[in-house]
Image (cartoon, rainbow, N blue to C red):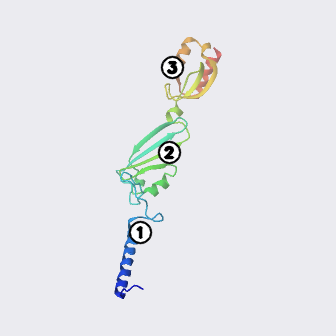
Amino acid sequence: MLPFSNSTKIRAALTVLCILLACTGVYYFVKPSANSDMPPALPRETEVAKQDAKIKITSTTDIVQRIVYLKCNEEETFRTKPADNLIGLNYQQIQQIYSGWTIEKFDMPEVEMSLKVNSLCREHANNMFIGVKDGYVAVFHGKPGGKAILKEVTKIPITKLVPGDAEELKHGMIVQSREELLRFIEGLESR
């Protein structure tokens, strides 16, 4: 054995032990482990959205509702103030009331939500017109113009129509009811 005194051996062992403890402490407290319960650090630009039960609708909150009509790809957006029965409700309570809606934003100044509906918007559902598609008389949902949706194409070629009728149909002729539509098409077929 080497000639070391007991106090030197104890001092050396304590020094090694302190260094090991310091390294272990630095490792566990400075470098987070993969199994840690702490979430990974996010870049400074990242915005964290969390639903806080303390955030509630007030009388000044704007409610923005967006309805997407899948059959015509149109959207309607409504901006209102909350009804009295919504004031004071939090995210979970609003989610229960508007169960079919997707809540996209929820904070005191504004709540945004959207709903997808498998139907036509009011303009397309309530309006029809007769026009021309590929040289034939056709029926469209909506109003004459670029956003019209084809409902059906008849077997009536526009070449068999009176020139004035053909010209009018090229611009689109609005009909007010299904009965008016049927009468007009019957009239075209009988000519």
Q: Which picture quadrant has residue 78?
A: top left
Does 152 appear above or below 68? above
- In the orientation shown, which residue stands out farthest toward the front? 2
Instruction: Name the secondary structure under disc 1.
Output: helix
Residue type, mark 2 in image: Leu
Whichever of labels 3 and 2 marks the residue nearer the N terminus, that label is 2
Residue at the disc numbered 2: 115
Q: Nearer the viewer, residue 160 or 174?
A: 160
Dot 3 crowding, Cα within 10 Å, few <14, some 14–19, many 20+: some
Q: Residue at x 43, y 59 (%)?
A: 40
Residue 18 spot, x, y in % from top left: 36, 77
The Cα atoms of the two marked residues, 1 and 2, are separated by: 48 Å
**Camera-nearest label, 1 or 2:** 1
Dot 1 crowding, Cα within 10 Å, few <14, some 14–19, many 20+: few
Instruction: Name the secondary structure under disc 3.
Output: helix
The Cα atoms of the two marked residues, 1 and 3, are separated by: 76 Å
Q: Nearer the viewer, residue 13 or 111?
A: 13
Numbered badge on residue 28: 1
Quarter of the rendering occupied by the N terminus: bottom left
Whichever of labels 1 and 2 marks the residue nearer the N terminus, that label is 1
Q: Nearer the viewer, residue 78 or 126?
A: 78
**Camera-nearest label, 1 or 3:** 1
Quarter of the rendering occupied by the C terminus: top right
Residue type, mark 1 in image: Tyr
What is the tally of numbered marks visible in this picture?
3
Q: Is residue 67 in view?
A: yes
Dot 2 crowding, Cα within 10 Å, few <14, some 14–19, many 20+: some
Residue 121 spot, x, y in % from top left: 51, 36
Residue type, mark 3 in image: His
